[in-house]
Amino acid sequence: MPADPAVVDTDCCVVGGGPAGMMVGLLLARAGVKVVILEKHGDFLRDFRGDTVHPSTLQAMADLGLLTDFLKLPHTKVSALSAQIGDETIHLADFRGLKTAAPFIALMPQWDFLDFLADAGRRYPTFDLRMNARAEGLVERGGRVAGVRVETPEGPLEIRSRLVIAADGRRSLLRDAAGLAVEDLGAPMDVLWMRLSRKPTDDPEAPLGRASAGRMFVTIPREGYYQCGYVAAKGSFDALKAAGIEAFRRQVAQAAPAMADRVDELESFDDVHLLTVTVDRLTRWSTPGLLCIGDAAHAMSPVGGVGINLAIQDAVAAANILHDAFGPDDAALDARALAVQRRRLPPTRAMQALQLVIQNRLVGAALSGRALKAPVAMRLFERFPRLRRIPARVLGLGFRLERVKSPDAFSG
Ligand SMILES: Cc1cc2nc3c(=O)[nH]c(=O)nc-3n(C[C@H](O)[C@H](O)[C@H](O)COP(=O)(O)OP(=O)(O)OC[C@H]3O[C@@H](n4cnc5c(N)ncnc54)[C@H](O)[C@@H]3O)c2cc1C
C-alpha cells in the first residue's frame, strides 16, 4: 500500500515558482501570511523564458526597497525601442520621460531575477519555498479547494491551505483540475528561439525587431550572445525541419542580414527551440479556495515582451487585496480572490487586445510575404519624438500600474 502523504498546514499554497508565484509568495510572506511555494524544478535555470524586466516591475522592486540591490545584478539597460519594417527604421518607444523609479527596461536572464526574489523571500520566517515539488492535483473539502497533492523526491505530500494560488504557467494543471474555462484568442505565429554570438565591439546593444516581406526576426542582447527569435507561421516548424538546417540558416540570414556571418553556429535543429505561441484567458480566475494569476490566468503573446511584467502586476495586486484576508471567514477570502480578477481583468484584456491587433496586422502581414510598409501610426512616432512616450507608457507601465501596498509585518 502507498504510504500516507506527509501533511503540511499553511495559510496559502502558491503553485509555481515563476515570476507570478515568486512575487506573490514574497509579498504575502512579507505581510506575515504563512506561504508554501511549490516549484517542480530543482532550480530556476531553464530554457529562455524572457528577459525583459519592464519599468512596472522595477517600480515594484523600488517599492520593496530592493531596486538598488537588484540593479547590481548583471543586466543591460534599454531606454528606447526601435523596429525595422521593410527598409525603414522606426523609433517606437522612449522610456526616458516616464515618471517612475527606473525609466528603462532591464534585460536580465529570468533565472537571476527569480533567484533574487527567492533570496528576498527567505528573509521572512513565513516564506517556505520547496523546489523539486510537483503539484499533482487539488485537495477538496466541503465543496471548496482546501490544498494541493504534491510529489517530492522524499515522497508524497499534502499541503492544506486556506487558499491555493495557481501560478503554474500557461499549461496550468490546477486550472484544468478546477474545471476553469479557457478562452483561446488565437495567434498566427510560433517563435523559434536560438542563440547567436555577439561581438563585443561593433554589435548593437539594444533589442531590435525586424520585419520584412515573409520574415520577422528579433535580437535580444545578452552577455556575449544574442537571444534570437525567428517568427514563423503557426505550425510550420515541422516543414522547416524537413527542409534541413542549411535551408533554415539561409532563412535566418535573409531575415537578419547582420547575422548572416554567424548562422553556421546553428549546427542542427537541436539549437532551435520552438515556442508555441498561445494567447488565452480564463473566463473566471477563481473558484472557492483557488485563485489563478499570471500565465495560468492569461497567456500573453510575446509581442512587447510584457508576459513577465503582467504576471508581476497580478502578484502585486493579489497581495494588496489578499494580505489581510486570511481570517476565519472563507466566504470573505473567496470574495477577495474574486476582487483580484475584477482589478486585473481590464488591463489584461486591453493589453491582449493591443497584442492581437499587432499580431494580426503586422505579424500576419509580414508572414504572408507581402511587401511591408510601416503603418501610418508608427510613422507618427518617427516624426514627432514626444509621441514615443505613449508606447513607452503602455509597454513599460501597462494599462494599470500596481504599487505595493501590502505591508512588511517584520519591519521595525
Ligand atoms: C520562450 C519564451 C519566451 C518568452 N519571452 C518573454 C519576454 O521576452 N518577455 C516577457 O515579459 N515574457 C516572455 N515570455 C512569457 C513569460 O515567460 C511569461 O509570461 C511569464 O514567465 C509568466 O509568469 P508566470 O509566473 O505566470 O508563469 P511561468 O513563468 O510559466 O511559471 C510557472 C512556474 O510553475 C512551475 N510549475 C508548472 N507546473 C507545476 C506544478 N504542477 N507543480 C509545481 N510547479 C509547477 C513551472 O516550472 C514554472 O516555474 C516568454 C515565454 C516563453 C515560453
Image (cartoon, rainbow, N blue to C red):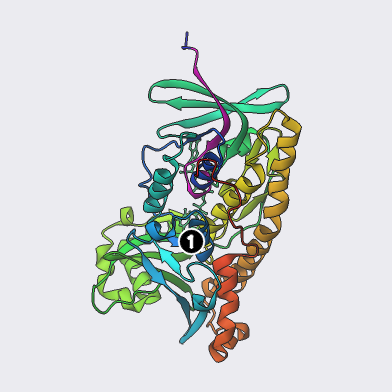
Residue 283 visible, this orientation: no
- Above or below: residue 245 compared with residue 363: above
Where's residue 355, x and y in %? 61, 66
Picture residue at 47% right of the left edge, 12% below the top: 2
Left or right: 245 as drawn, with respect to 64: left
- Name the one closer to the observer, 145 or 37: 37
Question: Where is residue 392, by image quadrant?
Answer: bottom right
Answer few, some or many: residues within 10 Å of disc 1's Cα (few below 14, many 20 plus, some between 14 and 19): many
Task: Tell me which segment is drawn in magenta.
Answer: 4-21
Residue extending farthest to the front is 412
Could you say where residue 65 lies in the image, as x and y percent from the top left?
A: 47, 55
**Is residue 20 part of the magenta span, yes or no?**
yes
Horizontal side of 42 relative to 126 (left or right) equals left
Q: Is residue 4 above or below residue 227?
A: above
Side of 274 relative to 166 (left or right): left
Residue under numbered circle 1: 58
* Residue 266 seen anywhere in this rendered image of the structure: yes
Give the residue at x 45% y 42%: 121
Residue located 55% across and 84% down the image: 374
Residue 161 is a magenta residue: no
Against 63, residue 397 (above or below) is below
Whole-percent x and y of residue 398? Answer: 60, 65
| Amino acid type of the residue tagged 1 in the rendering | Leu
